[in-house]
Image (spheres, rainbow, N blue to C red):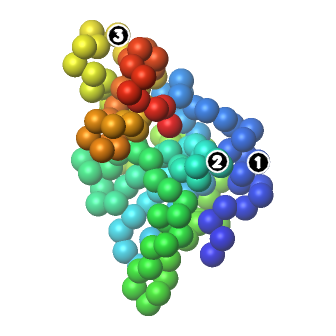
């Protein structure tokens, strides 16, 4: 199954960056037809082919916002050779309207991981570190990201 269509790519471009949204619009939903896993995608970077969205693999406290790649989803092979599929009947809507029991709005769910931040965090998003932790993902607010060149905002 083709996970991205031209229409979906246009919708990502139209909606754009949702950094300031507490309840972002989910553009597309992917799922594992043979096991656990739902990906509620709110953003896509066509240059890196990396998504940002809410990932529910096991449910409950294990659900979280994060980055995941198109290549990662396309390469998955589940039972009977089935891969990740796109929910053909899903229509774009705010994440709070997707029926996810464990969903907590972004600003309530994330806290800035920068120990020097004094709690004035706004726009907390995962960022990829250049060198520290060999490319690990941490949550830094926009103000902290701008101050530290060690990080690349995704």
For the question of whether residue 105 can be seen, the reply is no
The N terminus appears in which quarter of the rendering?
bottom right
Contact? badges 3 and 1 (CB < 8 Å): no
Vertical arrangement, residue 27 with respect to residue 121, above or below: below
| Sequence-wise first label, 2 or 3 | 2
- Give the CA separation, mark 3 to mark 1: 34 Å
Nearer the observer: mark 1 or 2; the answer is 2
Residue 145: % across, % down: 42, 22
Residue at 32% in and 49% down: 63
> Regarding mark 3 in the picture, which secondary structure is present there?
loop
Residue reaching furthest to the left: 115
Q: Residues within 10 Å of mark 1 (few under 14, many from 20)?
A: few
Q: Measure the C-alpha gap from mark 2 to mark 3.
A: 31 Å
Residue at the disc numbered 2 = 47
Q: Position of residue 79 (x, y in %)?
A: 40, 85
Q: CA distance from mark 1 to mark 2?
A: 14 Å
Res 29 → quadrant: bottom right
At mark 1, the secondary structure is helix
Q: Locate residue 127 relative to residue 51 in the image: left or right.
A: left
Circle 3 is placed at which residue position?
120
* Image: 5 above or below 13: below
Residue plotted at (42% across, 23% down): 149
Tell me if I can see residue 73 in this picture: yes
Q: Is residue 45 above or below residue 86?
A: above
Q: Residue at x 46, y 32 (%)?
A: 152
Q: Is the Cβ of the residue at disc 1 closer than 8 Å to that at disc 2?
A: no
- Report the residue marked by disc 1: 10
Categorize mark 3 by other alpha carbons within 10 Å: few (<14), some (14-19), many (20+). few
From the top left corner, tell me how far across and down residue 34 is, in percent. 41, 79
């Amino acid at each position: 199954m083709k996970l991205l269509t031209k229409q979906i790519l246009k919708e990502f471009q139209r909606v754009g960056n949702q950094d300031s949204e507490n309840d972002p619009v989910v553009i597309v939903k992917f799922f594992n037809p043979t096991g656990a896993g739902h990906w509620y995608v709110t953003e896509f970077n066509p240059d890196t082919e990396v998504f940002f969205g809410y990932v529910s693999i096991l449910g409950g406290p294990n659900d979280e916002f994060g980055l995941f790649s198109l290549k990662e989803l396309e390469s998955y092979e589940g039972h009977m050779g089935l891969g990740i599929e796109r929910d053909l009947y899903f229509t774009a809507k705010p994440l709070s309207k997707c029926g996810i029991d464990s969903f907590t709005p972004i600003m309530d769910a994330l806290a800035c991981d920068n120990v020097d931040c004094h709690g004035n965090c706004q726009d907390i998003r995962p960022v990829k570190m250049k060198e520290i932790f060999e490319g690990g993902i941490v949550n830094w607010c926009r103000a902290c990201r701008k101050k530290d060149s060690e990080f690349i905002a995704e």
